[in-house]
């Protein structure tokens, strides 16, 4: 008969893992907190640049918030609250969206395709009577 032996683990190592996880969580919180402070200072600049690059991004965001308030009121209220609290991140996201729209439009303007002008070509296909298919003979072509 086979016997399985389970190794016992050292409880000191598990506390070390918990301490490392807590340290990583605090480190991530510290990074997000400093990004929030930096984006809070830059939020007005982001909004102004967004309006300059593509004002429709701000309008679309307003329309989305309005539609949420109109059709899903609770979700709309939560969206407004989170938009106010997260204004630095929302303004940075809108700036990024406007910047990418601007770069895409600019890239598409410079791109040209090869084409052939066919407006002066007056070649008309003239069919002879023998090339024309009569409706009565249509079934004969499948034999």
Image: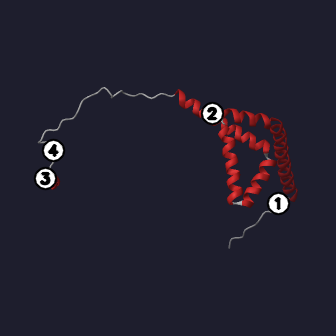
Residue 88 x, y percent position in the rendering: 79, 42
Residue 36 x, y percent position in the rendering: 82, 42
Tell me the element at label 1.
loop
Disc 2 to disc 3: CB gap under 8 Å: no
Tell me the element at label 3.
loop
Q: Is residue 13 above or below residue 103?
A: below
Q: Earlier in the sequence, mark 1 or mark 2?
A: 1
Quarter of the image with the N terminus in it: bottom right
How far apart, in angstroms, are the residues tagged by discs 4 and 2? 54 Å
How far apart, in angstroms, are the residues tagged by discs 3 and 4? 10 Å
Q: In percent of the image, x 72 and y 33: which residue is there?
A: 49
Q: Is residue 110 above or below residue 129?
A: above
Q: Earlier in the sequence, mark 2 or mark 3?
A: 2
Q: Is residue 3 above or below residue 85?
A: below
Which numbered marker is on residue 9? 1
Tell whether 129 sits left or right of 14: left
Viewer-nearest residue: 24 or 99: 99
On the image, numbered disc 3 is attached to which residue? 137
On the image, numbered disc 2 is attached to which residue? 102
Q: Earlier in the sequence, mark 4 or mark 2?
A: 2
């Amino acid at each position: 008969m086979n016997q399985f032996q389970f190794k016992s683990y050292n409880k000191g190592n598990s506390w070390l893992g918990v301490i490392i996880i807590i340290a990583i969580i605090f480190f991530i919180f510290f990074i997000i907190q400093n990004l929030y402070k930096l984006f809070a200072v830059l939020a007005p600049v982001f909004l102004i640049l967004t309006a300059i690059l593509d004002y429709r991004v701000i309008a679309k965001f307003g329309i989305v918030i309005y539609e949420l308030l109109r059709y899903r009121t609770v979700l709309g209220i939560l969206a407004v609250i989170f938009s106010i609290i997260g204004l630095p991140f929302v303004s940075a996201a809108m700036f990024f969206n406007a910047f990418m729209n601007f770069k895409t439009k600019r890239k598409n303007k410079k791109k040209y395709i090869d084409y052939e002008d066919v407006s002066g070509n007056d070649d008309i296909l003239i069919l002879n009577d023998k090339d024309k298919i009569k409706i009565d003979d249509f079934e004969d072509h499948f034999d």
